[in-house]
Amino acid sequence: MVQPEQVSLMAHQHIQVYLDGKEALSDNDVTAVLRLSQHLRVFGLLSAVGYVNQANAQGGEVRGRTVPVWESLLGQLINEQNPPARADLMRRVVEMARNQPSQYMQTWRKSLVLANHWNFWARAYSEA
């Protein structure tokens, strides 16, 4: 269980992992973080990982900008040390929702708390 005072540090580390040596996030990256926060609140964790995993024939610029950010942050949410790839991320969250609903709800709540901090740190590391 994560202590409240550790959440901001954890979110900062997640953003640092996504940055992967870059000094700043692009405006598109920041927007993707903000969209993830909104998606988690409105549709939930399962829907967010479904969006990351889906094979979208349309592709598109928005999806191309969004998926890498979401995959990084959601993967770290599930396993900070070894974030799962898209398909494994989806499989793990589906299994959790099906077989361990209380753990799924706890993880979703954790994502909602982290999302506020992801938003803060994404803005703090933005190019602007």
Image (spheres, rainbow, N blue to C red):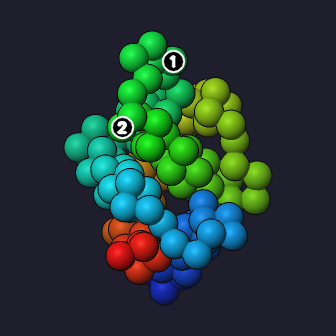
Q: Amino acid at mark 2?
A: Val
Residue 91, horizontal then vertical, whole percent: 61, 27
Q: Amino acid at mark 1?
A: Ala
The quadrant where residue 29 appears: bottom left
Residue 46, horizontal then vertical, whole percent: 43, 34
* Local crowd size for mark 2, using a 10 Å CA cut-off: few (<14), some (14–19), many (≥20): few
Q: Nearer the viewer, residue 71 or 107?
A: 71
Residue matched to label 1: 55
Residue 49, horizontal then vertical, whole percent: 48, 35
In which quadrant will I find the N terminus?
A: bottom right
Q: What residue is drawn where x is 41% and y is 80%? A: 124
Residue 70, horizontal then vertical, whole percent: 49, 47
- Above or below 25: residue 104: above
Residue matched to label 2: 62
Image mark for residue 65:
none
Which circle's residue, 2 or 1, is located before the other in the chain?
1
Q: Is residue 102 visible?
A: no
Q: Nearer the viewer, residue 62 or 40?
A: 62
Dot 2: element? helix
Residue extending farthest bottom: 5
The quadrant where residue 60 appears: top left
Q: What residue is drawn where x is 62% and y is 55%? A: 76
